Image (tube, helix red, strand yellow):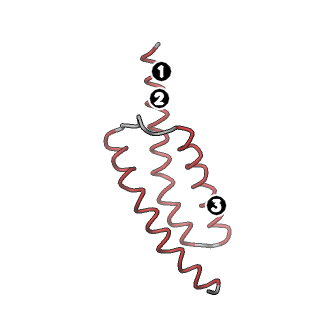
Amino acid sequence: MDADSLRWLGYPAATLTTLAFVPQAWLTLRTRNVEGISASTYIAFTVGVSLWLVYGWAIKDWALVVANSITLPMAASILFIKLQEDKRARARKG
């Protein structure tokens, strides 16, 4: 496979991984239930998505840019809720 053919492989891959993330993001944003979510995992994931976005932009790979532009706000929102809920839980414990 040549580089152009491989580049087109990125579009369905980006679409599927982004769409796979939507139900989790929707559920978390709707319920604010983050008990089963690891803050460190979401920090790493959100930073990783940010880096993929910058990388995609730098190499002009629009599959990476679009997918990570959609995923980043969802991941960041979940991370924000997780950190907020963890802070509330610590405050309740005193």
Q: Mark 2–mark 3 contact, CB under 8 Å?
A: no
Residue 43 screen position, x and y as percent: 57, 43
Label 1 SS:
helix
Residue 77 against residue 88 in the figure, above or below: below
Q: How far apart are marks 2 and 1 (CA)?
A: 6 Å
Label 2 SS:
helix
Residue 38 screen position, x and y as percent: 50, 38
Residue 25 screen position, x and y as percent: 39, 50
Residue on which the image places disc 2: 86
Q: Which residue is drawn at 33% across and 47% down?
A: 27
Residue 52 screen position, x and y as percent: 61, 60
Q: Which of 68 and 40 lies nearest the eye of the viewer?
A: 40
Q: What residue type is labelled 1?
A: Arg
Q: Distance between the residues labelled 2 and 3?
A: 29 Å
Residue 34 against residue 19 in the figure, above or below: above
Label 2 packing within 10 angstroms: few (<14), some (14-19), many (20+) = some
Label 3 packing within 10 angstroms: few (<14), some (14-19), many (20+) = some
Q: What residue type is labelled 2?
A: Asp
Q: Mark 2–mark 1 contact, CB under 8 Å?
A: yes
Residue on which the image places disc 1: 90
Q: Which residue is drawn at 62% across and 67% down?
A: 56
Q: Which amino acid does label 3 sit on?
A: Val
Q: Residue at x 64, y 83 (%)?
A: 3
Q: Mark 3–mark 1 contact, CB under 8 Å?
A: no
Residue on which the image places disc 3: 54
Q: Distance between the residues labelled 3 and 1?
A: 35 Å
Residue 6 against residue 37 in the figure, above or below: below
Label 3 SS:
helix
